[in-house]
Image (tube, grey):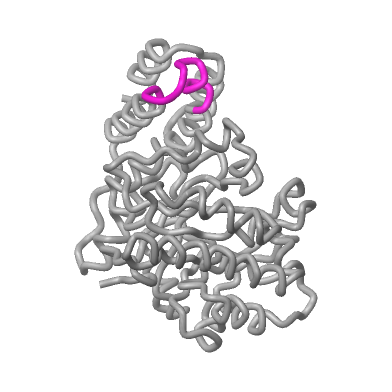
Amino acid sequence: MYQIGSLKLENPFLLAPMAGITDSAFRRLCREQGAALVYSEMISCKGLCYKSGNTESLLAIYEEEKPVAYQLFGSGPEFLFRAAEMLAEKDHAMVDINMGCPVAKVVKDGSGSALLNTPEIAAELVKAVVSAEAKRAEEKGCEPRPVTVKCRKGWDDTPWDFPGFLRRMEDAGASAIAIHGRTREQFYSGTADWEAIAAAKDVVSLPVIGSGDIFSGEDALRMMKETGCEFVMMGRGALGNPWIFRDAKALLSGDALPPELAAEERYTMIRRHMELLMERKRERVAVCEMRKHIGWYIKGLPRAAEIRKRVNEMLTFTELISFLENSIM
């Protein structure tokens, strides 16, 4: 059994939170393929507290995608506490605090990766959410939901007290720590430093979630073996490839990898993804959002560049599906 705080999971493979990607549609597909836990897109605590309509739309959870972790971002403990309180009646399984997003508009507010430079504030954020969860648990007579942290190995290559930062997160009450093996300055360039993940295992007694450069089921198993991390988080490697969870589960069980994907399987997944998107979004919005996913799904197929170009000109579900059926089947 794999466990984070009070949350028990069926395997160690998690879908990373990704803005503009991990909506309910994509989460459901990844759960169907074997992801043990899926994360929401980043949710702004200020947006939640000020009742932003866009923020509210990120909170929808379907039964078949559970368990779901909400990922919050912000830099003020009071906003984190209020946001966690506002989510008390929601049906999520865990709260994660984003301390890894490298995007400028996030870090300029002191959120995301910027929190690596203010470990005392980062610790207060964890304490605030842990306190809100403890309050909810006492009122309802249940166990508190786990509160976790997702961070990077540092801001840049300047030496810093990363072990001290991790200990602060543990002392503040975090139930697990996810570590992406890159600095903020790297964004997603270069190679993820798995040694930083392995080193964290010597610092904290909490479960460590490894992240960075997991593009296949084999990569997931190799990360666990090389770093000793208890969980592996798949992000970019799952784009257009929810089957990565199926493959990782097979290898973990000692089974052979499933056969290479046929074009028909890709088409079927694209169609299902599109249908799920249209359950909650207007057709034109769903089609526009689906374009990027199709680019990832068809990567490596003959005429992929030509197909992407044509797809980016289409505006209706019928037009899109008809074209793809004739192009990739």
Residue situated in front as seen by the camera: 50 or 173: 50
Give the left or right position of residue 66, taking residue 225 as reference: left
Residue situated in front as seen by the camera: 148 or 26: 148
Q: Position of residue 85 (x, y in %)?
A: 51, 53
Residue 17 seen anywhere in this rendered image of the structure: yes
Q: Residue furthest bottom?
A: 202
Q: Relative to 274, does residue 213 appear above or below in the rendering? A: below
Q: Position of residue 112 (x, y in %)?
A: 67, 57
Q: Residue furthest front?
A: 139
Identify the residue at image location x=52%, y=71%: 177
Give the left or right position of residue 148, taking residue 247 as reference: right
Of the 4 image quadrants, the one containing the N terminus is bottom left
Give the left or right position of residue 108, taking residue 55 as reference: right
Residue 192 seen anywhere in this rendered image of the structure: no
Q: Position of residue 300 (x, y in %)?
A: 45, 39
Give the left or right position of residue 50, taking residue 278 as reference: right
> Of helix, strand and loop, which mostly describes the magenta segment?
helix
Residue situated in front as seen by the camera: 183 or 6: 6
Identify the residue at image location x=39%, y=35%: 25
Q: How many marks?
A: 0
Identify the residue at image location x=65%, y=70%: 124
Q: Relative to 318, does residue 17 appear above or below in the rendering? A: below
Identify the residue at image location x=52%, y=75%: 173
Q: Which residues are magenta?
A: 278-289
Q: Relative to 21, does residue 213 appear above or below in the rendering? A: below
Q: Position of residue 265 (x, y in %)?
A: 28, 35
Of the 4 image quadrants, the one containing the C terminus is top left
Q: Relative to 160, does residue 268 appear above or below in the rendering? A: above
Assess whether residue 281 is covered by the magenta stretch.
yes
Assess whether residue 172 is covered by the magenta stretch.
no
